[in-house]
Amino acid sequence: MKVIIKTSLGDITVRLYDETPLHRDNFVKLAREGYYDGTLFHRVIKDFMIQGGDPDSKGAPAGKQLGIGGPDYTIEAEIKPTLFHKRGALAAARQGDEVNPERRSSGSQFYIVWGQVYNQGQIKQFAKQMEMQQMQQAFNALAMQHHEEIMQLRRDRNRAGLQELQDKLANEAQQQVKANGAGMTAEQQEIYTTIGGTPHLDGQYTVFGEVEEGLDIVDQIQQAATGRGDRPIEDIEMKMEVID
């Protein structure tokens, strides 16, 4: 399934992934309904990404703060290790972990990655950080499953028992991460050192498509002059067409 994002600067054709059906179907539904028509790319950061999909951006006066609008629902995360933030990736915006620990996506807001090209040393550091992050996430999930046991050990002031359980969960977390493919794959490392992207976002947001045509238009948009809230000074409107 493909969608053409028509802008005042040119067209961007995105292909939606079948591996993320909830996001694919929602994006297509909104595009067909005309939900995005007349909305803006309201947040643009050079060498990072371009963001759109806020319905409040339709006809928004200059200087208005944008970025919190959307339908009255969020979408369950579909974060896949094989779908990552290479240049041209289409991903769902969302609220931060502090209020959204399940990493549910905005019902309508999305971004397209531009990012930058990294050297091997930088990528190795990202891979190490990613592995540590995956370990922490796996450990936290296991700790939640043993919440009552942990609380009882604390009430009993059983430090030895707590340490034993912690060591056990840390080992289980390590095994889980290794089984799922720890850190960054060879493909990711190759792409981030040649094509570019935003590796620090991997595992944090749902990537549900990629640009097939019009990456030069994304480049033009990401270089747009911006003002308050990273909003382009000159509005960049969009309209969408679904290609079956």
Image: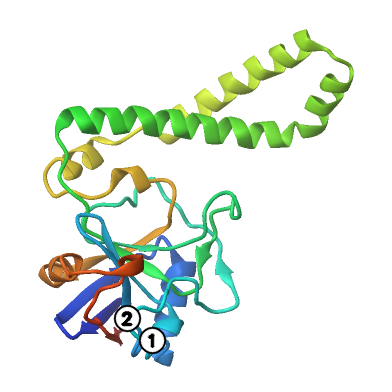
Q: Is residue 78 above or below residue 41?
A: above
What residue is shown with label 2? 40
- Position of residue 197 measured from the top left corner of the image (x, y, whole percent): 23, 50
Q: Is residue 116 visible?
A: yes
Q: Is residue 55 left or right of residue 72?
A: left
User: Which residue is drawn at the image coordinates 44% and 83% (left, top)?
Assistant: 55
User: Which residue is drawn at the image coordinates 54% and 36% (left, top)?
Assistant: 137
The three-letter amino acid code for the residue at tag 1 is: Ala
* Residue closer to the observer: 32 or 8: 8
* Residue closer to the observer: 93 or 174: 93
Q: Residue 92 lies in what quarter of the image?
A: bottom left
Q: Dot 1: few (<14), some (14–19), or many (≥20) neighbours within 10 Å? A: some
The three-letter amino acid code for the residue at tag 2 is: Leu
Q: Is residue 70 above or below residue 61?
A: above
- Position of residue 60 measured from the top left corner of the image (x, y, whole percent): 38, 86
Q: Is residue 231 above or below residue 60?
A: above
Q: Is residue 5 left or right of residue 83?
A: left
What residue is shown with label 1? 60
Q: Quadrant of the C terminus?
A: bottom left
Q: Is the residue under label 2 in contact with that under label 1 (CB below 8 Å)? A: yes
Q: Is residue 16 visible?
A: no
